[in-house]
Image (tube, rainbow, N blue to C red):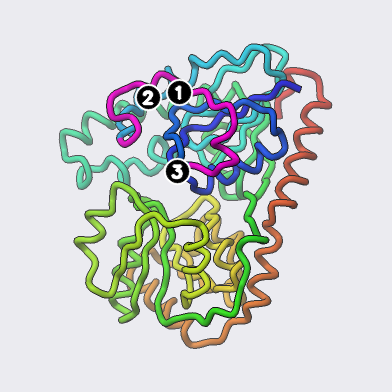
Amino acid sequence: MPTAIVHDWLTGMRGGEKVLESIGALYPDADVYTLLHVPGSTSPAIERRRIRTSFLQHLPGASRFYRHYLPVFPTAIEQFDLDGYDLIISSSHCAAKAVVAPGGSRHLCYCHSPMRYAWDQFEAYFGRQRVGRIGEAALRPVLAWLARWDAVTATRVHRFLANSRFVASRIRRYYGRPADVVYPPVDTEFYQPDATSAGDHFLVVSALVPYKCVDLAIAACQRAGAPLRVVGIGPDRDRLERAAGPSVTFLGQISDEAIRDEYRRARAVILAGEEDFGIVPVEAQACGRPVVALGRGGALETVIDGETGVLFADATPESLAAALERLAARRWEAARIRDHAAGFSRARFADRLGAIIQDTLAQPAGTRW
């Protein structure tokens, strides 16, 4: 069956790209459509596919500053010609779900989240403290328009899949549609415990963007007097480094093998922001390490408070620092933590997704859920 996979952009190997990789494993001959591709930025399994890009690929500075072109994303995603494909799977946290599918095809959207910055996190991305008073005033109507476009184009999807119950509730709220929950795949064969002893430091593995709240983790570790190591890159790095003291080490972008080693050596991994799902906590648990996470969003579905980690209630340095103390006060069973993470394996993802796709294809063309 001719199949196309549509992904927002390919500029790094994060959770969304790991989902794309697993979807692609089910459809090895599928073409990949994306707004922008930075060659070599993703896994070999993705890089060797047929990748087709939009006109954003040729705009000045797009490989580094693609987010500045947000207002033209709708035009770029709608210009893809998908005639000839019977099955379209979009992997979307921004614009991919708005691709125009040909008549008679089926379009399933694996939704990582409705657009955060257009719906309920405008202040975190484009508030006055980040872009200034004039920038905020200019961007607010643009993002309001983008939210309306996002809602209207949800009708182009025949069936929504959500990466968590939390995201399913957002899909219902903003798009008025139900969604089947399919938890993202974690490579539990790769992420495993070993004989490495945990150190006395904590770890953050994250894109350095506002909603990840890495600054909260820095402040809490400073309050608790604990060293912190930070893996990741992003536009917030300079600001975070200015706020950090000598006890915080920024490692930048490192290999998966190095990240696995960091998981194994950490006392615990910190998830300071509200995540739609959050693949990092599951990878850490697969390595037998506990997680300290804000008790909201996807963490409520991936971390068992008191068994595989500690949940804290308030997004404040005081609340997180207290959680770090609670974690340090008890012993953790690596085998129990690892067993929990096994429930999010790649095999389970493939079985669940494959069954839903077959069910969708068995319905009359045009059926919407």
63 within the magenta span = yes
Q: Which mark is residue 149?
A: 1
Examine the image and state in which quarter residue 252 appears: bottom left
Please state which amino acid type lies under the numbered disc 3.
Gly
Please state which amino acid type lies under the numbered disc 1.
Trp
> Horizontally, is 304 left or right of 325 in the view?
right
158 within the magenta span = no
> Horizontally, is 204 left or right of 264 in the view?
left
Percent of width and height locating residue 270: 44, 67
* Residue that carries the numbered disc 2 in the rendered image: 145
The span from disc 3 to disc 1 (Cα, nearest Å) is 26 Å
Q: How many marks are shown on the rendered structure? A: 3
Examine the image and state in which quarter residue 341 appears: bottom right
Element at label 2: helix
Above or below, comparing residue 318 to residue 207 in the picture: below
* Residue that carries the numbered disc 3 in the rendered image: 12
Examine the image and state in which quarter residue 227 appears: bottom left
Precedes in sequence: disc 3 or disc 1: 3
The span from disc 2 to disc 3 (Cα, nearest Å) is 28 Å
Q: Quadrant of the C terminus?
A: top right
Percent of width and height locating residue 14: 49, 48
Residue 172 showing in the rendered view: no
The span from disc 1 to disc 2 (Cα, nearest Å) is 6 Å
User: Magenta stretch?
Assistant: 42-64
Q: Residue at x 35, y 28 (%)?
A: 70
Q: Mark 1–mark 2 contact, CB under 8 Å?
A: yes
Neighbour tally class for label 3: few under 14, some 14-19, many 20 plus, Cα within 10 Å? some
Above or below, comparing residue 294 to residue 346 in the picture: below
